Image (cartoon, rainbow, N blue to C red):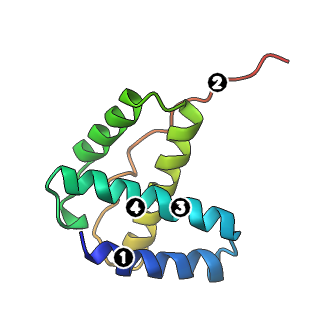
Amino acid sequence: MNNVKVLLNLFVEYLQIEKSYSQYTVVNYVTEIENFSSFMEEQALEHLEEITYNDTRLYLTELHKRKYSRKTISRKVSALRSFFKFLVREEMLDENPFSLVSLPKTEQKNT
């Protein structure tokens, strides 16, 4: 997944220039994408084009096994969905494997 770094740099520029996201948000997005990239390497997927909806489900299963909260999982999925949406928009990928992934409902606090 060596092409991820180049694409990630383009995505960072997009977030900073076009979206005006804070540096904190950009750093978090980068972290989430790098974590997913590491996971995909463990799954022997070398190119972003190879990632399918089933791979995204496998990643979510792994996040649940690691006992991440719903809010954390939502943040991770949201960052990845944005990254892949950007790649589709820029015609670097044909489809977004995260487009069908629904965000987990967050727990509501009783006030």
Instruction: Find numbered disc 3 in the image and state the secondary structure of the residue it sits on.
Output: helix
Residue drawn at 21 percent across, 57 percent down: 41
Q: Position of residue 88 (x, y in %)?
A: 37, 70
Residue, disc 1? 5
3D distance between C-alphas at marks 1 and 3: 13 Å
* Kind of residue sitting beneath label 4: Glu
Relative to 33, does residue 3 appear above or below in the rendering? below
Residue, disc 4? 34
- N-terminal of the pair, mark 4 or mark 2, is 4
- N-terminal of the pair, mark 3 or mark 2, is 3
Instruction: Find numbered disc 2 in the image and state the secondary structure of the residue it sits on.
Output: loop
Residue, disc 3? 29
3D distance between C-alphas at marks 4 and 2: 27 Å
Q: Quadrant of the C terminus?
A: top right
3D distance between C-alphas at marks 4 and 1: 9 Å
Left or right of 58 in this view: 17 = right
Classify mark 1: residues with Cα within 10 Å, few (<14), some (14-19) or many (20+). some
Residue drawn at 13 percent across, 55 percent down: 44
Residue drawn at 30 percent across, 56 percent down: 38
* Location of residue 71 by image quarter: top right
Residue, disc 2? 107
